[in-house]
Amino acid sequence: MKLLHLPRYMRGFIAMVSVLAFLAIGNQAFSQSKRRIIQLSGFVTDSAANVLPGVHIYVPKAGRGTTSTHAGFFTIPVLVGDSIVISSVGYKRTSYIVPDLPKDSWSVFIELAPDITLLNEAVVMGIPTEELFKEAVLAMNIPMNDSNLDPKSLNAEMIALMSRTTPMDGAGNYKYYIDQWSNSAGDKFRPIYNPFLNPLNWARFIRDLKKKKK
C-alpha cells in the first residue's frame, strides 16, 4: 500500500513517528559515544608501602594533571578510557587506564618500582692532613695551558651575563615561591607600593646617570 493512498492525517502521523524514532536512535548513539567523567583518587607508594609525595599524575590526551600531596594522596577528574601516566624521579614510570565502571568515583593504590642505576666503582682515599692533600692535587699534573681555554669564556661581561640569565635550580625556585607567597599574604592588608612614584628613587636615578656621563 502506498503512502499517497492514505489519508492526510495518517501520513502526518507516520512522518512524526519516523522523526521521533530517528531522534531516539541518534540520542542513544550519542549517549553511548559520550564518555563519562569519573573522579579518580588514590595513594602512591613505593615497594615498601611508603607514601610518595610530589608524584606527577598526568593525562597526556587532556594535557593536564596533578601531583600527590605530602601524604601521597591525589585526586583528578578523568574520562572513562583515559590513559594516565604516573612518574617520579628515582622511580619507573607507569600508566593506568581508567576502567568503565558504573561509578562516579574510583579509588586506586599505585605502587612505583624504584629505578636503579648502577654507577661505576669509585675509590675513596683518605688524606689525613691539608698538606698531603695539596701535594696530591699538584701531583695530578692537571694541564693548565691557556691555549686549551676559550678566551670568550673568561670574558667578564659574558660571565656576568651568564650569572644573570642562568635559571634557578629546585631550591631557588622553592625559595622564590615561598617569598612570593609570604609577600602576597602581607599585601592583603597594606596598599601596593609603586617605586616609580617615589621622588627619591628618581633623584637617585638622575644622580647615578650624571655620574656615568662624567
Image (cartoon, rainbow, N blue to C red):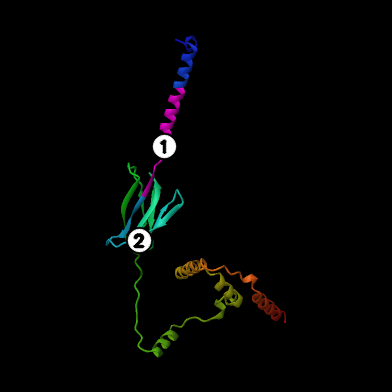
Tell me the tag on residue 58. none
In reply to whether residue 20 is colored magenta, the answer given is yes
Instruction: Give the Cα distance between marks 2 and 1.
Output: 36 Å
Disc 1 marks a residue whose amino acid type is Ser
> Dot 1, how many residues are within 10 Å of its Cα: few (below 14), some (14-19), or many (20+)?
few
What is the magenta range? 18-39
- Give the camera-side residue of 77 and 123: 77
Q: Is residue 154 left or right of residue 33?
A: right
The one nearer the camera, 68 or 184, is 184
The residue that disc 1 covers is 33
Q: Residue furthest left?
A: 48
Image coordinates for residue 148, horizontal then vertical, percent: 55, 77
Q: Which residue is mark 2?
A: 91
How packed is label 2: few (under 14 Cα within 10 Å), some, or many (20 or more)?
some
Q: Seen in the image, is 162 located left or right of residue 88?
A: right
Secondary structure of residue under mark 1: helix
Q: As shown in the figure, which amino acid type bears the numbered disc 2?
A: Tyr
Which residue is at the front of the view, 188 or 90? Answer: 188
Magenta portion: prevailing SS class: helix
